[in-house]
Image (tube, grey):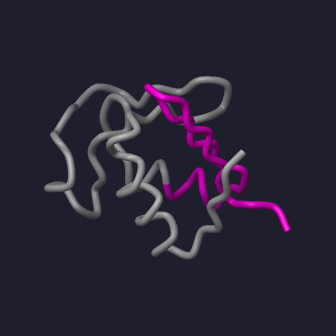
Amino acid sequence: MAHDVSVFIDESIAIVTPESRSARVWIDEHVVGDMGVLFLDNPSSAVANEEPLQWFGGGLVVEPRYLDALVAGMKAAGLDVGCG
């Protein structure tokens, strides 16, 4: 079974790639800000930043310190998240 979202983690950056339409829609509806740092479901979880999202190779660029909250939100929405 394919994942809805693939996550690649490096020491200084994470790339969160939506592999399904539902994952891309979720990101579009729930994540705003540079480096994916403001989650609309929980605005207090990160600093507000009005910059556009950063995309690289089809994946959302996220600072690792925000990855846990992002993945938790995706899983709570029923998305299957895997490492790739």
| In this rendering, position of residue 41 left or right of residue 6 | left
- Position in image of residue 18 (x %, y %): 64, 48
Rendering quarter of residue 10: top right
Verify whether residue 77 appears in magenta: no
Q: Quadrant of the C terminus?
A: top right
38 or 9, which is in the foreground?
9
Numbered marks: total: 0
The magenta span reads: 1-26
Name the residue rendered at 74%, 60% in the picture.
3
Name the residue rendered at 30%, 35% in the picture.
33
Q: Quadrant of the N terminus?
A: bottom right
Q: Residue lying at the far front in this picture: please name it.
A: 11
Name the residue rendered at 35%, 57% in the picture.
69
Name the residue rendered at 56%, 37% in the picture.
9
- Position in image of residue 56 (x %, y %): 59, 23
Rendering quarter of residue 78: bottom right
| In this rendering, position of residue 43 left or right of residue 76 | left
- Position in image of residue 17 (x %, y %): 63, 42
User: Looking at the picture, does residue 20 appear above or below residue 14?
Assistant: below
11 or 84, which is in the foreground?
11
